[in-house]
Amino acid sequence: MTQRDVEAEGEGEGQRSDPGQEGRQNGADAAPADGRTERDGSDVAELEDRWRRALADLDNLRKRYSRELSRERAAERERVAAAFLPVIDNIDLALQHADAAPGAIVDGVRAIREQALAVLAQLGFPRQDEVGRPFDPARHEVVAVVPTEEGSEPGAVVEVVRPGYGSERSLRPAMVTVAHDPES
């Protein structure tokens, strides 16, 4: 007689050796109909907790990044404004001496202009006003096209109407007149 035969014989006679076995067979410890067990429920609760914590961490990170970005913007505005303070000071000095000789005032205004251009260059936006350069759509805006004259090449800038500012990034494109060969 095998173990299976003994178990089948005991079941056939309705005898049970373990009184607690009856409850388990009636479904007390059986898995729920959807296939989840208590352990699955605790795993789900743990995963939900971890998920909520991750969402809270992400929300905190977003808020911290937003605060840092605001601080950096404010600091950059302060640096730019501080760079222009000497220009403002020199304009004030020029206005105080407005009654002086006109030639001195003009020289002072030119010096202030050069100082302002130097500040823009330090900020990464140098003046772009070279004549004779090839037209570059990233740096130039064509406002007029003129026939090619002697000494100029087709597609070259022959006049800068309004200077542009910038190098890698353009603050403002230069407004230019470009030479064009009428025969082509």
Image: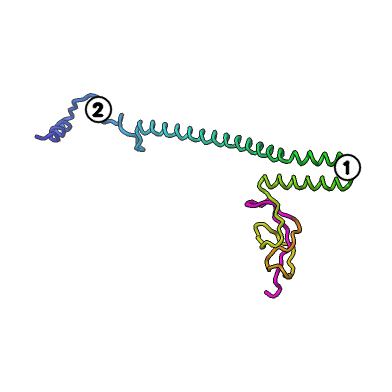
Closer to the chain start, of discs 2 and 1, is 2
Asked if 146 appears above or below 79 in the picture, the reply is below
Describe residue 1's horizontal placement relative to residue 117 as left or right: left
Are dots 2 and 1 in contact, CB under 8 Å? no
Asked if 149 appears above or below 82 in the picture, the reply is below
Q: Is residue 168 magenta?
A: yes
The answer to which of 46 and 165 lies nearer the viewer is 165
Q: Is residue 148 magenta?
A: no
In the image, residue 82 lies at what x, y percent? 71, 38
- Please, what is the three-letter code of the amino acid marked with disc 1? Ala
* Label 1 Cα neighbours within 10 Å, binned few <14 / some 14-19 / many ≥20: few
Q: Residue at x 32, y 34 (%)?
A: 31
* Label 2 Cα neighbours within 10 Å, binned few <14 / some 14-19 / many ≥20: few
Q: Residue at x 18, y 25 (%)?
A: 17
| Residue identified by numbered label 1 | 98
Q: Secondary structure at mark 2?
A: helix
The answer to which of 39 and 152 lies nearer the viewer is 152
In the image, residue 107 lies at what x, y percent? 82, 47
- Please, what is the three-letter code of the amino acid marked with disc 2? Glu
Residue 89's quadrant in the figure?
Answer: top right
What is the CA distance from the residue labelled 2 to the residue labelled 1?
110 Å
Q: Residue at x 51, y 33 (%)?
A: 57
| Residue identified by numbered label 2 | 22
Q: Residue furthest left?
A: 1
The answer to which of 13 and 148 lies nearer the viewer is 148
Q: How is the image coloured?
A: rainbow
* Quadrant where the N terminus is found in the figure: top left
Q: Which residues are magenta?
A: 163-184
Residue 60's quadrant in the figure?
Answer: top right
In the image, residue 140 lies at what x, y percent? 69, 58
